[in-house]
Amino acid sequence: MRRYTLSILQPDAEATDVETLSLLATLVCYERPTVIVEAGTYRGHGALYMAAALKEQDIPGHVWTADPIDYGFSAFLGTHELREYVTAHQVTFEEMLPLVPTPIDFAFVDASDRRPGFTASSRLVHVAMLLPLMRPGGLIMVHDTGSEPGSWAGLEAIRQMGDINLSGPRGLTLIQVKR
């Protein structure tokens, strides 16, 4: 299995960990999605890993990512040869969804709980919004679900929806949309 790394990325404590990013890219290669959405762009690491996987595997897919705050990703994206694979919106996830073609094949839910108007429970709201827009059999990957039970509203509900719950580094839940 190829381990994806983009050496130009500058990790920080707030960004998605490299292990999760590598798994994200591997799932994109395996599932070969054409319509991918991401809730929570932050510095764009998730979007770049997914776009790199699309490009490397010659998958005719595209990533739509949303974050109401631009942490420099728009300018950063221009320095890569991945711009044709990513559309970044500086809006909320809810505002972006109507702009995305459906059905959605793959979703990465990683919206921050540190911004005004966002809480960790927003992830449950995002999953609920995604479910009717997803392709049957499509995947939703929710990050940061390794928290202690009860640490944020909706965590247990997401884990119960999950077909696979992984514990580390920060926890992941994979939900396969029922057919």
Image (tube, grey):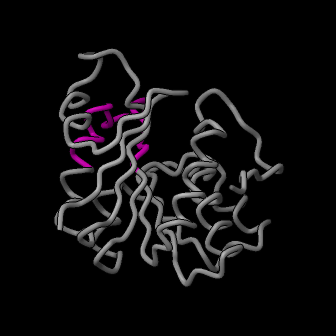
Left or right: where 141 falls relative to 49: left
- Which residue sits furthest right? 7
Residue closest to the eye, 125 or 91: 125
Residue 171: give x, y in percent of width and height.
Answer: 45, 30
Examine the rendered structure and indicate whether residue 4 appears above or below residue 89. above
- Residue 100 point in image, percent of width and height: 35, 75
Q: Is-magenta flag for residue 123?
A: yes
Q: Answer above or below: position of 106 versus 149.
A: below
User: What is the span of residues highlighted in magenta in the rendered image?
Assistant: 109-126
Q: Nearer the viewer, residue 145 or 92?
A: 145
- Residue 58 image point, x, y percent: 65, 82
Q: Count the marks: how many? A: 0
In the rendered structure, the answer to whether residue 120 lies left or right of residue 85 reads: left
Task: Give me the residue at 46% from left, 78% from top.
Answer: 34
Residue 22 in the image: above or below residue 62: above
Picture residue at 33% right of the left edge, 36% below the top: 118
Q: Position of residue 41 (x, y in %)?
A: 52, 51
Image quadrant where one finds the N terminus: bottom right
Which quadrant of the view contains residue 76?
bottom right
Residue appearing at x 18%, y 61% in the figure: 178
- Where is the C terminus found, in terms of image quarters? bottom left
Residue name at image x 35 percent, y 65 percent:
96
Q: Main secondary structure of the magenta part?
A: loop
Extreme-front residue of the structure: 1
Residue 148 relative to residue 78: left or right? left
